[in-house]
Image (spheres, grey):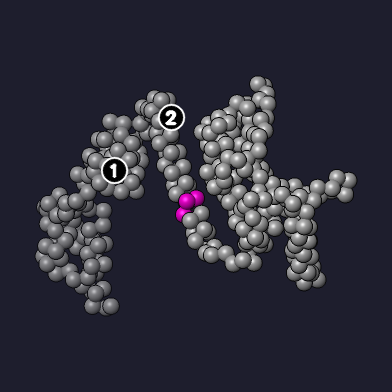
Amino acid sequence: MTEITDKYADFEALREQAIALRREGLSRRQIRDRLFIHNNDILNRLLEGEPPPEWTKRPNAKDDLRERARELRIQGRTYDQIQLELGCSKGSISLWVRDLPKPERRRTSEEASAIAKRGWEATMRRREEERRRTKEAAAGEIGTLSDRELFMVGVGLYWSEGSKDKPYARRENVTFVNSDPGMVQVFLAWLDLLEVERRRLRFSVLIHESADVAAAEQYWADLVGADRGAFNKTTLKRHNPRTVRKNVGTAYHGCLVVKVLQSADLYRRVEGAWYGIVLSARRTDQPNRA
């Protein structure tokens, strides 16, 4: 420490020499070698405030990009447009042009609406794809139903969608009504499991009078694989002109009514099975209420 102090005791005189050499255009290395200064801290202090000569500055690879980005911003380009042309990050562009005024929006309302519509359509496609994948995964988890599983499903299906007996109106017969072809197919598979002969089934269509009645009748006949002789007369629902119906078009087939003849005993079995399911569910739920 004493040697360094002695060597640079006349600091101001040494600084004058360093600044003079700097202004002559010498680099830091040249000044260091000329004045025999090998301590970077001392050299920094001697040259403090003196800019380096132009020839010592290293060219920055982004200098040209920066200038071009500023030119484009002044022309009214957005960050996205500048990035597309120059290939640099938006972060860099933001630093380079943040002192410049923002360009005025040049899109018309129609253009902005079209851009928003394209974005929304892309979102809807993505959501629809997510729905499809979720449904396919759930369907794959079911596998093959056992007889017991199909029986339980059928009981719940009937008790939610089928006709029921009331103390004030005895209707101990099995009658199922639904517009969902999948529900109808599961119900028929359940009847097959219970060995209900197809000859005991009677079908009828319930549909709005403004629909294509003949096409609906043929649709349901094909679905259940039954002869038209197994179909009773179609029931037409009167159309109220003040009501705006949404169930229109070729996909609308009305409802199918499936009635099982001589089904009082079957109805009682179904009702008893449903009560058994309810009691079992209650017993299962008891520990959760403790």
In this picture, residue 232 sits left or right of residue 124 = right
- Residue sitting nearer the eye, 113 or 218: 218
* Residue 113 badge: 2
Q: What kind of residue is marked 1?
A: Gln
- Amino acid beneath label 2: Ser
Highlighted range, magenta: 130-134
User: Which tag, 2 or 1, sits closer to the chain's start?
Assistant: 1
- What label sits on residue 238 in the rendered view? none
Q: Dividing the image into 4 quarters, which one contains the N terminus?
A: bottom left
Which residue shows up at 34% across the image and 48% down it?
91
Quarter residue 274 falls in: bottom right
Extreme residue toward the right, this view: 168
Q: Position of residue 26 (x, y in %)?
A: 12, 57
Q: Position of residue 252 (x, y in %)?
A: 56, 35
Say the numbered circle drawn on residue 83: 1
Q: In terms of depth relative to the viewer, which is nearer, 171 or 82? A: 171
x, y (%) of residue 29?
14, 64
Residue 11 falls within the magenta-colored stretch? no
